[in-house]
Amino acid sequence: MDLDEFLAAVEVARRPELRGKPVVVGGRGDPTERAVVATASYAARHFGIRSGMPLRTAARRCPDAVFLPSDPPTYKAISEQVMATLRRFPVVVEVLGWDEAFLGAKVSDPEALAGDVQRAVKQATGLACSVGIGDNRLRAKLATGFAKPAGIRRLTRENWMRVMAPRPPEALWGIGPKTAKKLVAAGITSVYQLAATDTDELAQRFGPTMGPWYRALALGAGGTDVSADGHVARSRSRETTFQQNINERPELEKELGALVERVAADVNSEGRPAARVAVKVRFAPFFTQTRSVTLPAPTKDADEISAAALGLLDKFEPGRPVRLLGVRAELEPAR
């Protein structure tokens, strides 16, 4: 189950006069400020606006778009309402995020169940959702994409190759743009070609683990387990975008310290220590680098996290104007 254009849909529900208009949610809703798109409505996506795009770029692509500030507390509350609605069904609900969940069920008519889910979510929240049906997690996930907006699609072993064979490798859940480029460089431009490539050849090119795994994805392989266990965070991170570039090291260290304090508080609230620390720097105009380090021992101590972050700052080229700074603490796995 995937909520359609979730953040934008929540905002439109609050402002019905915006229905059908290009709506962009992100930052403080000011496209003259430095911030990125959190979600764009389908009408805005028609202009090529995508999540992660700078708001200024979005404004250039669609000057008539309505820009709105992000409101995480409201999104979280509505997401919880949706998930509570799903749990009323005789299914196992595994939450993937604010707007997405796997439903584990064994039924003779999954389309009927999907329709019931859609109607229940609509009645409870006013939001539309798309539902993908599959005989494993991978196929259900991809089917959801084909179902958008507000539809139901089934993708199983029977129709997998008919649907997926001509599509590019990045159409697979688990293959991103960088991997797709490497596959294209190897002459693999479709899911069919990836599925037909020798496993040993893929292992030589992409490693003994990842190479065979890419082929397994192309064949539609995937797990079937759905767990109702609560979502366990793998990391906690904070970042800030500066409206004016920062060039001086002392000012960077001050901003880094403020971020570390917030991350350390998040780590302590999780109750699990940080095992690794990463620092992200986005240089002007829009070039991003990340450096990370494994801590000598897992810790919740803010001073130790700070020391690691400051050490990582030394690994970036000094003197370049910085427009964004971020800190991430990767948590020790839950036991």
Image (tube, rainbow, N blue to C red):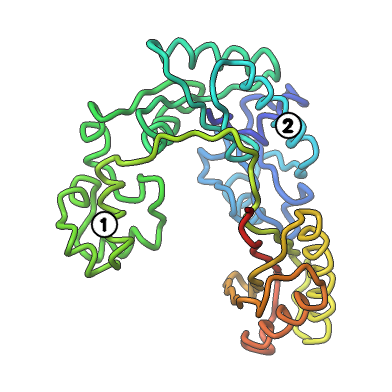
In the rendered view, would you say 80 is above or below 286?
Answer: above
- Residue drawn where x is 70% and y is 71% of the image: 323
Image location of residue 132, percent across then percent down:
43, 27
Image location of residue 310, percent across then percent down:
74, 83
- Residue drawn where x is 21% and y is 35% of the image: 161
- Residue drawn where x is 50% and y is 13% of the image: 115
Could you say which is closer to the camera, residue 2 or residue 96?
A: 96
Return the residue found at the far front: 335
> Which residue is tagged 2?
11
Crowding at dot 2, Cα within 10 Å, few <14 / some 14-19 / many 20+, comes out as many
* Tag 1: amino acid: Pro
Residue 279, picture quadrant? bottom right
Left or right of residue 278, residue 300 in this image: right
Could you say which is closer to the camera, residue 240 or residue 197?
A: 197
Image location of residue 76, percent across then percent down:
74, 37
- For label 1, the SS is helix
Of the two numbered discs 1 and 2 on the same chain, state the one appearing first in sequence.
Answer: 2
- For label 2, the SS is helix
- Residue drawn where x is 65% and y is 39% of the image: 230
> Which residue is tagged 1?
212
Residue 205, picture quadrant? bottom left
The Cα–Cα distance between marks 1 and 2, rounded to whole angstroms, is: 43 Å
In the rendered view, would you say 311 is above or below 17?
Answer: below
